[in-house]
Amino acid sequence: MALIVHKYGGTSVGTPEKIKDIAQKLKTLKAQGNELVVIVSAMGHTTDELIDLMNKVADSPDHREYDMLISTGEQVSASLMAMALIDIGCPAVSLTGGQAGVVTEDIYKKARIKHIHLDRLKSELKAGKVVIITGFQGIDSKGDIITIGRGGSDTSAVAIAAALKADVCDIYTDVDGVYTTDPRICKTAKKLKYVSYEEMLELASLGAQVLHPRSVECASIYNMVIHLRSSTKDIEGTYIMSPQRIAKEVGKMEKKQAVRGIALDENVAKIGVLKVPDKPGIAAKIFGALATESINVDMIVQSIHSAGALADMAFTVERADLKKAVEVANIVANEVKAEEVVSDADVCKVSLVGIGMVSQPGTAARMFETLSKEKINIQMIATSEIKISCVIKKEQGKRVVQLLHDAFDLDKVS
Amino acid sequence: MALIVHKYGGTSVGTPEKIKDIAQKLKTLKAQGNELVVIVSAMGHTTDELIDLMNKVADSPDHREYDMLISTGEQVSASLMAMALIDIGCPAVSLTGGQAGVVTEDIYKKARIKHIHLDRLKSELKAGKVVIITGFQGIDSKGDIITIGRGGSDTSAVAIAAALKADVCDIYTDVDGVYTTDPRICKTAKKLKYVSYEEMLELASLGAQVLHPRSVECASIYNMVIHLRSSTKDIEGTYIMSPQRIAKEVGKMEKKQAVRGIALDENVAKIGVLKVPDKPGIAAKIFGALATESINVDMIVQSIHSAGALADMAFTVERADLKKAVEVANIVANEVKAEEVVSDADVCKVSLVGIGMVSQPGTAARMFETLSKEKINIQMIATSEIKISCVIKKEQGKRVVQLLHDAFDLDKVS
């Protein structure tokens, strides 16, 4: 007998049939003597439909009322799941975030979970019921309904699993795990059995949108193992855990493969502010102005210009922000007497991710060598302890992913 | 400055445009210095859509989960209404039944309201906000969401108005008041300015489905005036209040018109159990058996049959129940050795309703005389203190309504 925590995403509970299928699976697990806690997202496009309604009644919808409205989506799927279970003879109960004791900060739309009062949850489990909990929400100190922002249901699941001291949090979704790279780009991409929290965070923020970074952060804080897996195929997915646990599972002190995954981000644009006077405070001015406009800056590279005390400043932004970012950059460039602002939307970013890279300095060299052999021009480079990113021409992105996948033997990882 | 309580039904809040229109109207009332509490139903067909989903996941949906599911409909319309108000600069807040302090019995699907804790509601009013409350629901002692059964939102509105000691509860709907009879049947039907609770109860149970009987009952207990009115036309509707208050409003001790309304019920069928041995306990047997099958019996008439100690028993049921009712009647008839069971679905019921009838004994006579003059055969008669009902041939129903409307000068009521 074990305590099992499952989370099902919006696609997984998207139709009454899918809900009934999951109910059957849960009933079997329950019959095997397990205690079950299930966190659900809103069905398919429910949230989008509610947002559509909202935009028809208000130009700038109030945040408190947004939470009141949007939280109904999960309440619908949770009660349907409980009904489906009870209907096939498996005792169950659905709980709203508030009823499940999920207490958040007093911030509408993007609160963080403060703590979870387990009394009701535990008493329902003790009564032999499968407990279905609405993801993405809790209540604040006033008893108001609060949603916890993007990726919220994953975070709810991890937090509840951690509070219950479960061994693992199974997150069911429409992909069957984390791959070395996008299998649509690279036929030889392989599913990873283990990924560390840090690697997952990098892969997630680089476009592998299978898990929200916040839920991974939360899991790493509580050392909660996430098992990311398919809601339709009954096969093992990918375990996301600490490097220490991975080493224990794998049974080796050191990892052979430094690089664990390759991410391609095509939703990126490059801006250069050229011949900036090389004085303190200039970078703060540029990026301060961009932050004020809520423009997220990703890579930043500053290089000394050949012609004396002038620097070139290059950075990347999301493609949708390019126009606004260029406007802001031009204003600041004028102010600080930079010579020119240039931009390029015809780029992409390829990143190698792996926690072992820090101890294998040859990784970057091999990456550059692979690209150089194929005459691919690298426009920007940025490195962190577990990531190397290159900005290249957009049309070359997919081919480079394949080249690097081969060069680093990612088709042979396990 | 007054405390105003409004209730808007599902049709009235059926589209984002309608919600925005109501918001404008509420803003104006607020700007005039009034305190506003608004109870809303679920938008249009939301409840039906949720029930449809429910029936796809479960054959016999659990009652607790039914409440959890269905209550989301009102939460959506309440939050949209609050958003629409805030968006046009009118402070507002939506509250679930639970947040508004509506505490019910611990019975799912059809609880009664036990009491209303006004703390939060009053503090939101004090903060200058229009308070929007989800109708049809509250919470029980465990904190579970409870719906309060059919006609629930009207009842919520009346109960909240009573708890707040409001002068009147305005119920906005898709008709503009209570008429002397159905205006689609009788062109000269007139809108009544005042109807007593008792008359409204009879009219409601006779098919004038504008207000659920339960909300009228609740209003009569707390002596709460209901103003039933149109959500689209800005005109006075019908006030439902005690006969004492009506007398005061009208300024007369006695009412001139004994009959206040005529109802036609075409959804009725007649069953006769003939030549029943006239012994105690037979009626209990017949109607007990019908009750066991959840068949609602309306009129019951027992007459001594001419041939000695045998009685005929006749009663009416809803047309949909006729087949089942005949089966049950046949079984019992066999048991008690009655001679025969006959039935007739080709009937209708015409009723005169008026609280003054009790003191004007001529009413029944005039009704029968009117029908007899036109050679209309009366098959069954039933009377109460404020109602006389006749069962006649179905095809004659609409004409009889018109005849009686003229005979009792209902086109001249006020």
Image (tube, coloured by chain):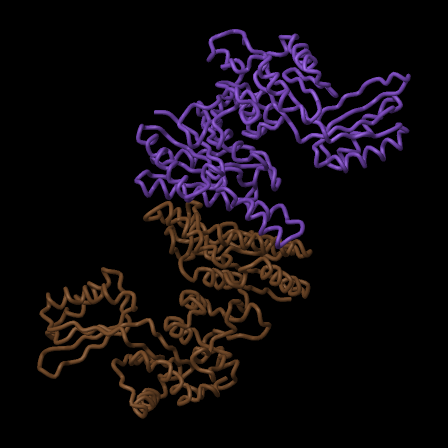
Chain colours: A brown, B purple
Q: Residue furthest front?
A: B374
Indicate left or right for B259 with B310 as reference: left
Front-most of residues B309 and B163: B309
Indicate left or right for B116 with A393 as reference: right
Indicate left or right for A13 with B303 as reference: left
Place of residue A244 in the rendered image (x, y in percent of width and height, measured from the top left):
46, 78
Q: How many numbered marks appear?
A: 0
Front-most of residues B215 and A147: B215
**B344 in relation to A413, above or below:** above
Place of residue A363 in the rendered image (x, y in percent of width and height, measured from the top left):
35, 88
In the rendered image, which quarter contains the N terminus of chain A?
Answer: bottom right
Place of residue B14 in the rendered image (x, y in percent of width and height, measured from the top left):
46, 41
Front-most of residues A338 and A124: A338
Place of residue B145 in the rendered image (x, y in percent of width and height, measured from the top left):
55, 44
Image quadrant assignment for residue A300? bottom left
**A301 in relation to B90, above or below:** below
**In percent of the image, x 69 and y 56: which residue is there?**
A89
